[in-house]
């Protein structure tokens, strides 16, 4: 059982939460990047999943702040969004991102990404 922080659109948060709780993960959702950063600092989750265009504090700035935090710097962060991989990867890989899910994604893709990042691997499926 892993503790996972999900930050983003409330509808997607709920979908991700339902899928991961069926895998016996404990999931805490927030809809704003600032709130998510604060919650992650407090919870110290095993994994953070964040929508690329999260309100308040976008995912790229969230990632930069998490990397500067002694509490969060070693926690893997999985980005997701509607951008095609060939658009998203050049934006997120250079900063050190560990993974990306292109929405809409399947239950199997979410679980595969979660499992990879929790094993210390990256998750960047080939662009179509």
Image (spheres, rainbow, N blue to C red):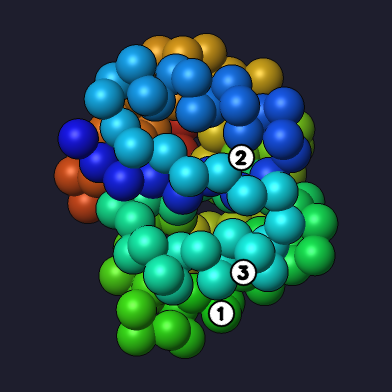
Q: CA distance from mark 2 to mark 1?
A: 18 Å
Note whether 73 is above or below 4 in the view shown: below
* Residue 58 as seen in the image, left or right of residue 98: right
Mark 2 or 1, nearer chain start: 1
* Residue 76 appears in the picture as rendered: yes
Q: Which residue is mark 2?
A: 80
Q: Quadrant of residue 74?
A: bottom left
Q: Residues within 10 Å of mark 2 (few under 14, many from 20)?
A: many
Badge 3 element: helix
Mark 2 and mark 3 residues within 8 Å of each other at the beta carbon: no
Q: CA distance from mark 2 to mark 3?
A: 13 Å
Q: Quadrant of the N terminus?
A: top left
Q: Which residue corresponds to mark 1?
A: 65
Would residue 122 be seen by someone viewing this image from the given angle?
Answer: no
Q: Is residue 73 above or below residue 88?
A: below
User: Front-most of 80 and 35?
Assistant: 35
Q: Position of residue 14 (x, y in %)?
A: 61, 27
- In this view, 31 is above or below 26: below
Q: In the image, residue 104 lies at what x, y percent?
A: 67, 19
The crowd level at tag 3 (other Cα within 10 Å; few <14, some 14-19, many 20+) is: many
Quadrant that contains the C terminus: top right
Q: Mark 2 or mark 3: which comes first in sequence? A: 3
Provide the residue designation for mark 3: 62
SS at mark 1 in the image = helix
Residue at horizontal 34%, vertical 56%?
45
């Amino acid at each position: 059982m892993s503790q996972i922080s999900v930050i983003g659109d409330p509808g997607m948060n709920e979908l991700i939460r339902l899928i991961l709780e069926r895998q016996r993960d404990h999931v805490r959702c927030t809809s704003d990047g600032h709130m998510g950063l604060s919650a992650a600092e407090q919870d110290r989750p095993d994994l953070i999943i964040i929508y690329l265009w999260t309100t308040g504090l976008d995912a790229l700035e969230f990632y930069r702040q998490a990397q500067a935090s002694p509490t969060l710097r070693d926690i893997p962060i999985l980005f997701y969004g509607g951008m095609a991989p060939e658009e998203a990867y050049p934006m997120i890989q250079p900063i050190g991102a560990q993974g990306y899910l292109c929405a809409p994604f399947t239950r199997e893709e979410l679980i595969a990404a979660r499992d990879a990042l929790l094993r210390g691997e990256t998750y960047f499926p080939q662009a179509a």
